[in-house]
Amino acid sequence: MTTKHPAVRALQGMDALPWADLKHNHGTAEDVPGLLHDIAAGDKDGREGEEAAYELLDLLFHQGGRICPAATAALPYVLALAAIPTVPQRLTLLELIERLADTAATAEPRFVDPNWPYAWARSRSTVEHLSADPIPVVRRAALAILAAAPEPVTPTLKLLRERWEQDDDRTTRLAALVALGQVAASASPDELGRVASLLDSLLTAGEPAVRLAALHALGSVDPDAPVRHLDLLIDTFTAPQAATELPAAWADATLTGLTRKSYNLVADKPEAAAAFVSRLAAPSRPAELRAAALERAGLLLAQWHSPATDLLPVLAQSLEAAEPEIRVQAAHLLAALGTVSAPYTEQLAAHLADHGSRPSRRCADTVADNALWALSRWGDPRCLPGLVDRLFARRAVFATHGSHYSPGFLYFPTLPGMHEVLMPLRAHADELLPDLRALLRRVHASDDHEAARACAQVLAAWGPAALPALPELTGLLAHPQVRRFAAEALASIGPGAAEALPDLRRAQAGIAAGTRAEAAERQLFAWARARLGDDPQPALELLGAALEEDRVFHVAIRHMGDLGPRAVGRADRLHCLMERAHPESWEKVEAAIALWKVTGTSAPWLRSLEQAVLPLAQGRYLPVMRRAVEGLAGIGRLGAETRCALEAALTLDRRLTSSGSWRSFVEDEQIRRAVHELLVTVD
């Protein structure tokens, strides 16, 4: 009698399931059995099985947030394969199970397949068995799964404590200790108390790695504990040999990774987080620890104002470090902080020729690049000579497009785009225009549309000051890829650019009227012509038709408002759009501003703008709120409730931003400046 291979036995009964009727994150699940068979087949080099395992992870988990029916059906077979020692992809399969278990525990119930709890209850014993697997990394993977899905808690606590006390692998013991704290957070008071006592006793352990693991575990039980033991946390990282002992003891850890994890223990306490970062970034620390601390400093400063007081001296010291990567990090953060860093202008200016870079980054920005950006942030004239060409020469660093990141657990130390550096320098337009015009001619001749667009965006931001660039802008109107940006720049210049009207008319006449995008472009050109003093009737007709559609883009509403009293016949439609839009939408805010411009009255649309900015008092920011503040400043009226809310917003320590990286600082500056100007100019 032939004995079936264990992997084949693990999949018995799988093919009888109605996979075609089940769904995963990319559609029908009929491809799941084939992937599981590929994993079980164990091809010679393991490549096909590994590809199948990662594809399975994508289908069943994707980006998380839900448990699909296919994941429930596949669970017992995935675990059965993971339990077979000869399956090379067992760790990838266990990673999939951990992600699914965590999702099932944290997602809203409506996003979890109702059959998952039963499937998990039947499969849990396999995970418990794997927690005693001969291979330590497999044991740790099983412990991570149990920490994510601890129910029933009491036996899970018992198993984890046994692993902590009896496992012969130090890294697995530490993983069990951290998991013990995670699970104890859901335990009864008595069980929690026993775990807390154990963890407290370990804070005086001789090994730094044990102390650190105990602090992480205690942070799950008592979130305030890491702050109370902040000195111990810092001393653990700065102990002799900690830089080598800590990563060696923790699973798949580097000193940088451990610094990130440990920072998260105090991240929501700005004062403690600032102390953690500043003390680990001191010049006497190992270079890797200093670099890791400065990386966390970016995240901290992008979220809060107050830590700058403690961190500015540390950044200034780091700017003189021997290691170029640390100097780059320091220069970047000093630049991002804006006017707060102004006392260090001379020190940064001294680094304009410092070409030290980050060797580990694909886009190796230098200390000089960041110092140059810093001086531009302050409008320091020393940044101006040759600025346009210097930025354009560093296109891998100062791109001709913008990069956007969400605020979150990482700070990406990217630099602004070339155009984003130049746009705020309107006061220096006279000095910068000759070089910008020359660059625009070069990129125009080479059909570099992205760079041409960036240049046009700069000129649009400079408004009437960009008038000398009229010949270059009109030259762009013949190119479909960039003509809309040229039209926007001409409109920003205003009536002074009236001689460009024939070119605008010709360009508009060459735009087809077929697609929605083409219709929007025709509206844009008609609006730009009106801004330059041409007959507004074409704009009224084209924009009026756009406002009657079911889906109205907010730019069309803004452009209609720019036509002022001549668009009064569209007031009823604008009012309808305002009433039906979401309170914090661009459509509502633009319709309210347009109604004020068109009718000359502020009620009832004033209230729509006030409602849009009230969330600022709670620290919530969306870019549309800045537009609403600008609208309120134009109207010149403000209710008492709104004034109180805006005054409260200016006192917040948390930055008012919806973006990550350097934009966190710039958005916060812009909205606070706009709010301050509104409050001082409106009674």
Image (cartoon, grey):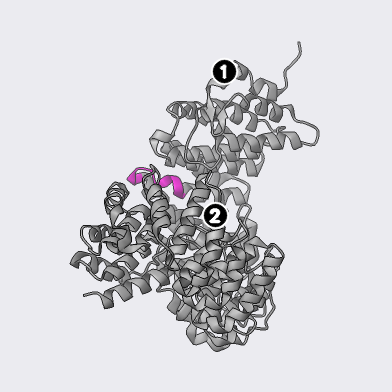
State the SS at label 2. Answer: helix
**In this rendering, is residue 95 above or below 522?**
above
Magenta highlight: main SS: helix
Magenta region, residue range: 181-190
Alpha carbon distance from label 1 to label 2? 61 Å
Residue sitting nearer the eye, 363 or 431: 431
Neighbour tally class for label 1: few under 14, some 14-19, many 20 plus, Cα within 10 Å: few
* 431 in relation to 226, above or below: below
Disc assigned to residue 472: none
Q: Residue furthest right?
A: 44
Q: Nearer the viewer, mark 1 or mark 2?
A: 2
Residue at 45% across / 71% down in the picture?
A: 494
Res 662 seen here: no
Residue under the image location 62 percent in, 69 percent down: 398
N-term-proximal mark, 1 vs 2: 1
Which of the 4 image quarters holds residue 92?
top right
> Which residue is tagged 1?
17
Residue 327 placement, left or right of 179: right
